[in-house]
Amino acid sequence: MEITHANRSKSENPLSERTRKNPWWIETMLVDGIKSRPRYNGLSVNKSSRNHVFVADGDGVNAIADLFAVHSQDIGGHVTIVFAEHNEGKAEHAAPLESISADSVHIMPSIPTAINRLAGVLHSARMGTQIYASGTEALIGLTIQLAQAYGMDPQSVITEHRGSFARRVQCVHCKGFTEDVRTNIVECAHCRTNLLVRDHYSIRHAAFQGVCVDAEVPGDLPQVIEAFK
């Protein structure tokens, strides 16, 4: 029986002087014009919908509050809000919910639990339901992924980015996901491969793609920078 391993051996050698001085990987990490890179056009009201489902985390709730402050008269029908709290600034982030006129509000302790709650909402949703997602890229991506799983056009989800640009990254080698990535180089949380975080994005996986950065010389890494704050 042939057995393959997603992870590989790592060199114990310290980083080379060439690696410390040569930042060329940084320049090739983010490439303009990649079509899969998500774009967020900002929240707007779908006036024809009679069932509005808003999903947000962190500062994303302020985007919903701003929309209601200007266009509340255009939002007709049933309004549901699913909000994912974060450990930092819970009270501050949740406060705007009090100013929003909604029929039901679900405050969840994390993004995964908020997505699970959203699945329950969509399970009983009717034709013509409009989904809105605002907040971090991870929250928006997972919302779009779920909407697609329920047969909706992913491009129909109205989005607005607020807050951190930290990324959800899929390792192309072991297929595992690493959450809340803020640096250009990250160690895969599963197979421990050093990954270069690219702008290539998968809607199906709701994640940016990470590829092995030191395949030729294990342990020889480019400069690590905080690229996604």
Image (cartoon, rainbow, N blue to C red):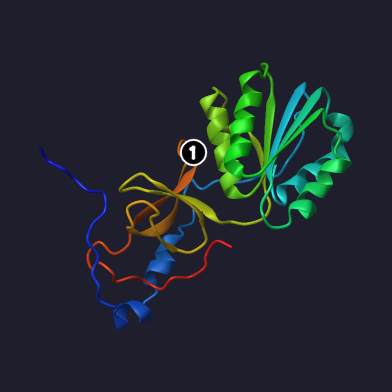
| Side of 178 where 82 appears, left or right | right
Residue lying at 83% horizontally and 29% vertically, measured from the top left: 75
| Side of 97 where 8 appears, left or right | left
Query: How far from the left and from the top, in percent, is residue 41?
Result: 67, 44
Query: How far from the left and from the top, in percent, is residue 12?
Result: 25, 72
Residue lying at 32% horizontally and 46% vertically, measured from the top left: 174
Residue lying at 62% horizontally and 44% vertically, measured from the top left: 110
**Considering the numbered disc 1 on the image, is that residue within a helix, a strand or a loop?**
loop
Q: Quadrant of residue 52?
A: top right
Pick the quarter of the image with the C terminus.
bottom right
| Side of 227 where 111 appears, left or right | right
Q: Amino acid at mark 1?
A: Ile
Residue lying at 50% horizontally and 41% vertically, measured from the top left: 206
Front position in the image: 94 or 51: 94
Front position in the image: 169 or 32: 169
Pick the quarter of the image with the N terminus.
top left
Where is 211 relative to 27, above or below? Answer: above
Where is 99 relative to 194, above or below? Answer: above
Mark 1 nearby-residue class (10 Å; few <14, some 14–19, many ≥20): some
Label 1, on which residue? Answer: 203
Query: How far from the left and from the top, in percent, is residue 49?
Result: 75, 23
Where is 209 relative to 74, above or below? Answer: below
Front position in the image: 34 or 4: 4
Query: How far from the left and from the top, in percent, is residue 39?
Result: 59, 46
